[in-house]
Amino acid sequence: MPRVIKILTNYVIGPIITFGVYIFIFGHLLPGEGFDGGMIVASILILCIIVYGKDEMEKRISVNTAVLISVLSAIIFIIIGFVGMAGLRMEHKYFLDNFLPQGSFSHLFSGGIVPILNILVGFSVAFGFYAIFAYLSEYKTEE
Amino acid sequence: MFEILIIVFLVFILIAAVAAVEMKDLLSSIMALSVVGFGLVIIFIFLAAPEVVSAQLIVEMLCFVSLVVVVNKTSKTDETKLYSMREISPVSAGLFFAIIFIIFGLWGIKGLPPFGEPVMKVSSIYIQKVISEIGAKNIVTAILMDFRAFNTLIEVILLITLFVGVATILRKKGRKDAESN
């Protein structure tokens, strides 16, 4: 890639990752949720693969690490669902019950498990799509 | 007014979809396909749905980039053979099923509520309970992550299944080859 694109990418990485993380952390207060924020973070990781090449990104975030993070967040999601079955709040005993306290309305710490699930979905989507694109960029036709 | 605009954009999307299927050059076909997605984004803006707009916009961008990369790495022209007019049977079968689909579709549309007047049986309960029981300000996220959290969980598992499929198809060496080398 030309040097101009590399320098521009360097300036863009920070703001866009901050924007994506902001969207999935504030998902319960503003439009956008975990999926949207995760896709924004994934798009900047994919831009890094296109600009710097796959080998350079493999040193920073390897595909195995990305898969591990993606699958671990899904497993934590399921574990939170089983914790909800313990009946911690109002004797509700169903899968994925909102067992945490509500907090004060329209503040960052509110909504019980909603922000936690947002963050988990965001991590899962971001690193999952990064891994898919890393596999796609590795593929070459046999000539 | 909005209904006319929405119908205009829907016709535009249909034309773009047919163009995406019929084009020989794969890059311009991808362009036509992204016209379909961005037309949907404009329709969602008219319908005042910011959540769906953001999701659709980002997914469409990523799909466009991934498809361009895939076309760059594989082949640039569509190599499937077009049916000549002599082979009448596939064309007539397609027309037959299209007519059946249109008949059943019109029959099904009769049962839908009119545009702009949704049936509020379940969603009114959600709107009543979202402040007292969950406390999240954004009702859409509250529905997705609490009332329908099981749905979201299956979505995440679906994404991971997608990733496993891609990794299985695109890996360079099978496990036995790697061991023997």
Image (spheres, grey):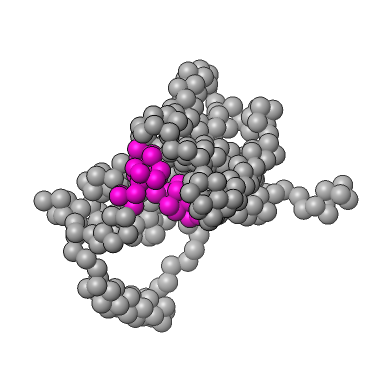
Q: Position of residue B112 (x, y in %)?
A: 24, 68
Q: Nearer the viewer, residue B133 or B11?
A: B133
Q: Which of the 4 image quadrants contains residue A140? A: top right
Q: Is residue A96 above or below residue A45?
A: below
Q: Nearer the viewer, residue A88 or B57?
A: A88
x, y percent for residue B37: 35, 49
Q: Main secondary structure of the magenta part?
A: helix
- Which portion, as a residue range, is magenta? B126-153
Residue furthest left as drawn: B1
Considering only vertical position in the picture, is A48 above or below B115? above
Q: Can residue B5 be seen from the camera position used here? A: yes
Residue drawn at 42 percent across, 29 percent down: A108
User: Is residue B161 within the magenta segment?
Assistant: no
Q: Nearer the viewer, residue B34 or B155?
A: B155
Q: In the displayed structure, would residue B19 be above or below residue A31?
A: below
Residue A63 picture quarter: top right
In the picture, measured across the screen, residue A103 lies left or right of residue A67, that is left
Residue at 35%, 44% (x, y): give it.
B132
Q: Is residue B61 something one can see in this rendering?
A: no
